[in-house]
Amino acid sequence: MTATTPKATSAIPSFCEGIQYFSDTVPGFETYGKAPAIAQGSGAIADIADPAAVFQTLLAADALRYLTLQVTASKASGHPGGFASQAEAYSALVMLGHKNTVTEVGHHAPGFYSAMFLDRSLEDMGIVNVQQMRDRFREMHGLLGHLSGYIPGLLAPAGPLGQGQHFAMAGALLHPDKLFAFTMGDGGMGEPYPMSSMAHFHTAYPKATNFLPVLVWNGYSQEHHSMVSTKTNAEMLAYWQGNGFEEVILVDAKEFDDKNQPGDYVDSTAFSIEQRMAFTQAVLAGVDKAAKSALGGKLTVFIIKQLKGAGVHARGAKSHNLYPKDSLDAPHIVSALKERALPAAAWELVRTNCERAGGGPASKTVVTEFELPLPDLGQLPLEEFAVGGEAKVSTTAMGRLVGKVGERDRTFIVTNADGNEASGIANINQALKIIHPTTDDLYNQAPNGQVYEPLSEDACAGLAVGLSLFGARTLWCSYESFAINGLPIWQTVTQAMAELRRQTPAAITLYTAGALEQGRNGWTHQRPEVEAYFAAMMRNGNVFPVFPTDANSIQACYEWALTAKNKGIVITASKSPLPIRTTFAQTRQALQDGAVVLQETAGDKKVVFAVVGDMTLIPVYEAAASLAKSGIGSRIVSVVNPRRLYRPTDVAWDTCSQPDGGFLSDEKFAEMFGGDALIGVTGGASGMLEPVMLRSNCRRDTFAWKRGETTASAGELMAFNGLTPEALAKRAIELVG
């Protein structure tokens, strides 16, 4: 096979513009490339043993390798090696008609983009030829370095390791008739989350086996040998079997090597064409068996063992990342591209197969390109408590509504790692039941429940937000102090939601048992610094932390959240009985304006208290009463939806696909927060008060969380952090002078 730079000729398809090297032929093409292996009107090959189908699967794998390397080298940046080592497996999935494929590995992005190019999905974003793909790789509004929600045909984002399985499992739950494969690297396998989350999911949903891990066992991680590189095949099989996988299918390239390559990991692209065909045949048959097994009710994994970087510019960890020296005119890149070059007719054949596979381009067929039909929830049975009446637990009031949502929408699930009962929402468990193979009424357990309780915040957040991204309603409940372990995937999904070309229900989470309620548990349970995470994310444009004032307010907040699209909504509330201070109407207005005035006291001077949270209102009311005795007036403002209090230019709202440009006007801000002095008060991170502090022209100060300690009461913990009526009143007097 010889590679040449193309000449202008009508024989080269227009989509190939930008391909630098073509070959005159490839061995076997004249015999096995006469007609597409996927017939017109069919979505998959007819016979996995057909040599033409095997050959064309191999051809597709090499086309993916070529594009992956050329596109990354066009920017001397990106990650070709990992995807290259499993190109035959991905190609087999496509040729078998399976396109609902996600990945654990953000570094596989250029390979996935190449696949979306080959099946014409990228045409939906104006990429019709290879040159345009090269131009827009790793550029704004193009093919960003890791998968996102922006790319047509790709089901889910990918970046941090340990996330991909959640998306596959979410798809499996919602679409039991489809296969959701996901690729994971042997480096990512070292994360603790994938195996434990799949094990819990399988226990909870034993029939939902239609997700398929595809382990890319190539011996290397980013910069060194992978930690599982020393395992034998038998040990790897035993590992997966020991984690509950009934069907473990491993195809090892080493068994087909006819070039005497050293080591346990070899490159199949170096084999003779006969052995390349034999290896590809084994992969195709293995993937077919794995897919049927997963769809047929067995927990299954497919493992492809092949050296990292197979068929590209380098091998091992050196193939992982490109650097400035790895440009398209570098000799080693030129050599690798020429080695993988295909004739124009082969490109045409590969594209035809890829386009026909699965019934059409992924951008027109995969489940996430369509909005999931959901049942109408109707009017929720909100219960409005009398202002000034009996104290109520906010979380319990919301929990009753959550139960009603689950009764009306059977796809709805609630996730919680630390127990709903401990958060004042036992009524959720009573209404919807904890998913467990053991039925037990005392513990509200049932196999067909809707409350998912793995002891991992990552697994809780992962399944909940994965389902939200795929179009379902969910609720992730967590103790505020533990939520940090689930936030990376929540952030990944909310960022993707900002880019999606379709509407999807908001990713809603409820954080309870805040720091102030956890005095006796000590600082291990007092981590309201997590609020700083959301304070920063508010500027993204689609993230809305909300702080209900009371048990009425939380119901109105949840009602609003259920109607929101493509947002991340964080509801933070106490599980203690607290006074009722607002009506539904006031909170609905506060969700629109950002805050609500709770109390106004006349005086010679006016101190405004901007308060985030419910318990923190207690010392503020006492401080206001103390100030009134001194003739100083006050206004207590409950900050319910701080994102609305930013200025429009502070927030990237207009970059979101479902933009929400609602912000409080300057006039209304002055009316609500204007005075002689302003004191921001929060039991969490001070960053949540930034929108107020940015816009205020008063003399001002902030009272916020400092650090945790073991105390007997919330009042004592607030005192430890300086949040006392005396301190607030003293500072107010100083500010008004």
Image (cartoon, helix red, strand yellow):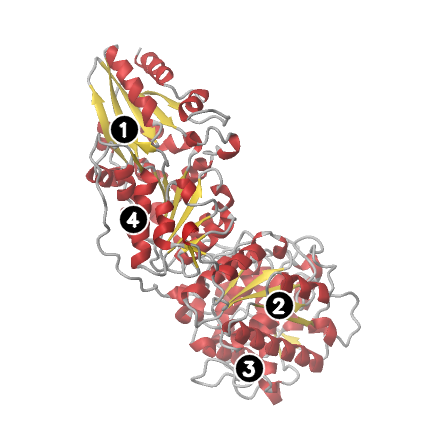
**Amino acid type indicated by mark 4:** Leu
Element class at badge 1? strand
Pointer 4 or 3: first along the chain: 3
Pointer 2 or 1: first along the chain: 2
Mark 1 — residue? 637
- Residue at (57, 61) in percent of width and height: 108
Q: Is residue 652 above or below residue 193?
A: above
- Residue at (58, 57) in percent of width and height: 195
Mark 2 — residue? 86
Disc 3 from disc 2: Cα separation = 24 Å
Disc 2 from disc 4: Cα separation = 47 Å
Left or right: where does residue 412 sit relative to residue 316? Answer: left
Disc 4 from disc 1: Cα separation = 27 Å
Mark 3 — residue? 345
**Amino acid type indicated by mark 1:** Val
How many other residues sit within 10 Å of disc 3, few (<14), some (14-19) or many (≥20)? some
Q: Are marks 1 and 3 in contact (CB under 8 Å)?
A: no
Element class at badge 3? helix
Element class at badge 2? loop
Element class at badge 4? helix
Pointer 1 or 3: first along the chain: 3
**Image quadrant assignment for residue 688:** top left
Q: Are marks 4 and 3 in contact (CB under 8 Å)?
A: no
Number of dots carrying numbers:
4
Disc 4 from disc 3: Cα separation = 60 Å
**Amino acid type indicated by mark 3:** Ala
Mark 4 — residue? 401
Quadrant of the rendering where the N terminus is positioned: bottom right
Q: Nearer the viewer, residue 215 or 389?
A: 389
- Residue at (30, 54) in percent of width and height: 405
